[in-house]
Image (cartoon, grey):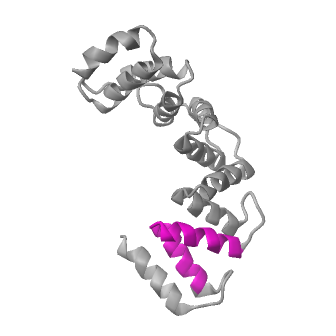
Amino acid sequence: NAHKLISPLAEEGDALAQLFIGIMYEKGKGVPQNYTEAAKWYQLSADQGNALSQFFLGNMYYKGQGVPRDFFEAANWFELAAKQGIESAQYNLSVMYFQGQGVLQDYKEAFKGYKNLALQGHARARYNLGLMYYKGQGTQQDYKEAFKWFKLAAQQGSMEAQLNLGVMYQKGEGIPQDYKQAFKWFKLSSDQG
């Protein structure tokens, strides 16, 4: 099986093989699921600079799977992976800055991360950026900008963004009040659950 083929390379220190062994243990593919083994292999690969292993290891620290739950460690690994272009790591790190998990709460840093991702088309980041503009967190409150980012996220299927667009149309925040549009967005949101 794949585990037998890849194991010798992983044991010799091949970072990509170590990543694959970690995935196999985390997902229970070809081997019994074992988060501790997964974390061990991700750690070996991450220490060699493998960005995906850094991201997966960050997730394991964030969730406390195979390692003690440690938001500080999670943030460190997400930051390393984000610097190498792993979008999900950048998103997770932005969430951690917003919530103050493993890092000092910093709305401006969260805003910066969300905006970078939003400009790349990341739907959840677009929604979060809209929320930050709406509430004035990490930036000046700006309903027009909030509307813009909610609409982009809503068009990508974000239920929360659709709901917020409905509220903004209903109240006339950042755009002219329009009950028909409010109903349309409320319906789209409620149709999702």
- State whether residue 74 is above or below residue 107: above
Measured from the top left, where is residue 152 in percent x and y? 56, 69
Q: How many marks?
A: 0
Residue lying furthest left in this view? Answer: 1
Q: Which residues are magenta?
A: 143-169
Q: Residue at x 55, y 18 (%)?
A: 48
Would you say residue 150 sits in the magenta stretch? yes
Image-quadrant location for residue 18: top left
In this rendered view, identify the residue nearer to me: 66 or 52: 52
Q: Residue at x 58, y 61 (%)?
A: 126
- State whether residue 159 is above or below residue 73: below
Measured from the top left, where is residue 100 in percent x and y? 65, 44
In this rendered view, identify the residue nearer to me: 71 or 185: 185
- The prevailing secondary structure element of the residues shown in magenta is helix
In the shown orientation, is residue 133 left or right of residue 183? right
In the shown orientation, is residue 61 left or right of residue 148? left
Measured from the top left, where is residue 52 in percent x and y? 49, 32
Measured from the top left, where is residue 77 in percent x and y? 58, 30
- State whether residue 108 is above or below residue 175: above
Quadrant housing the N terminus: top left
Would you say residue 151 sits in the magenta stretch? yes
- State whether residue 175 is above or below residue 14: below
Image-quadrant location for residue 138: bottom right
Image-quadrant location for residue 96: top right
Quadrant housing the C terminus: bottom left
In the shown orientation, is residue 94 left or right of residue 163? right
Q: Residue at x 46, y 11 (%)?
A: 13
Residue lying furthest right in this view? Answer: 140
